[in-house]
Image: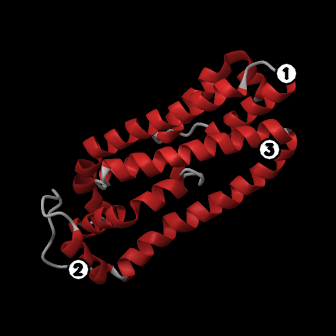
Amino acid sequence: MSEFISHYGVWLVAAFIALETIGLPFPAEAALMAAAVFAATTHGFDIWFLIPAGIVAAVLGNIAGFWIGRRFGHHLLTQYGPSVGLTEDRIRIGQWLFLRHGGKFVFAARFLPFLRNMAAILAGANEMPQRKFFFSSTIAAVIWVVGYVLGAYSLGEAFTKVATPAAVLLGLVAAVIILGVPVLVMRYEKRLLERALLELPKSSPAKVGTNVSSP
């Protein structure tokens, strides 16, 4: 990866970060670490250019992903959601969860494989407040980029050897979240829907069904 980065530079790393953030399977984390190691060992480019480029790419990716989710996500959920068990009531619960806990989810997702790819689109589709999304996602992006760049730059290959198994562990955590949250929603669906009906803005476009679907 370092050799690949040496040929195409910081802009390739930035492109990987932005594209991964909007849901495409690009190795942004590996590219970021490889670029920092390359900068430390060969002085091919300055990490003080790599850091802002990475942050800007992550922020732009967040904006694009959020817009895609806001523009197309709700329509896709309502049109195709029922075929995979996403009833109107469950869509409303998802909106409520993002209203109450979206900031924490978006922040944590930046550090979790798989969830990092889908967090912005999910936030947009579930109508998370824009200011809360941009604040949480930007803070997370800054910490993620600075942490990985400075860690890889300072510790070199030693950092990447620690970061790789850590990424596997975080990937397992993300898988548990992806599988576990729907199970919890179905288990406590009626209670969650009651709270969603009380707390969601009345102008929310989701239509609420008269009955809660059984799990």
- Which residue sits at x=44%, y=75%? 183
Question: Which element is circle 2 on?
Answer: helix
Q: Amino acid at mark 2?
A: Glu
Q: Distance between the Cα atoms at labels 1 and 3?
A: 17 Å
Instruction: Identify which amino acid the numbered label 3 is placed on.
Output: Thr
Question: Residue at (60%, 21%) from the top-left corner?
Answer: 11
Where is mark 3, residue-wise? 160
Q: Badge 1, how many Cα within 10 Å: few under 14, some, many 20+?
A: few
Amino acid type shown at disc 1: Thr
**Which numbered dot is residue 194?**
2
Q: Return the disc, 1 or 3, that comes first in the chain's sequence.
A: 1
The crowd level at tag 3 (other Cα within 10 Å; few <14, some 14-19, many 20+) is some
Considering depth in this image, is 72 or 65 the residue closer to the camera? Answer: 65
Q: CA distance from mark 3 to mark 2?
A: 46 Å
* Residue placed under numbered mark 1 in the picture: 42
For residue 20, side relative to residue 66 (left or right): right
Q: Earlier in the sequence, mark 3 or mark 2?
A: 3
In front: label 1 or label 3: 1
Pointer 1 and pointer 3: residues touching (CB < 8 Å)? no
Look at the picture and state if 60 lies above or below 85. Answer: above
Q: Give the total number of marks visible in the rendering.
A: 3
Residue closest to the eye, 179 or 108: 108
Instruction: Tell me if 191 is positioned left or right of 104 in this view.
Output: left
SS class, disc 3 = helix
Q: Looking at the picture, how far across and down is residue 161, in whole percent?
A: 83, 48
Quarter of the image with the C terminus is bottom left
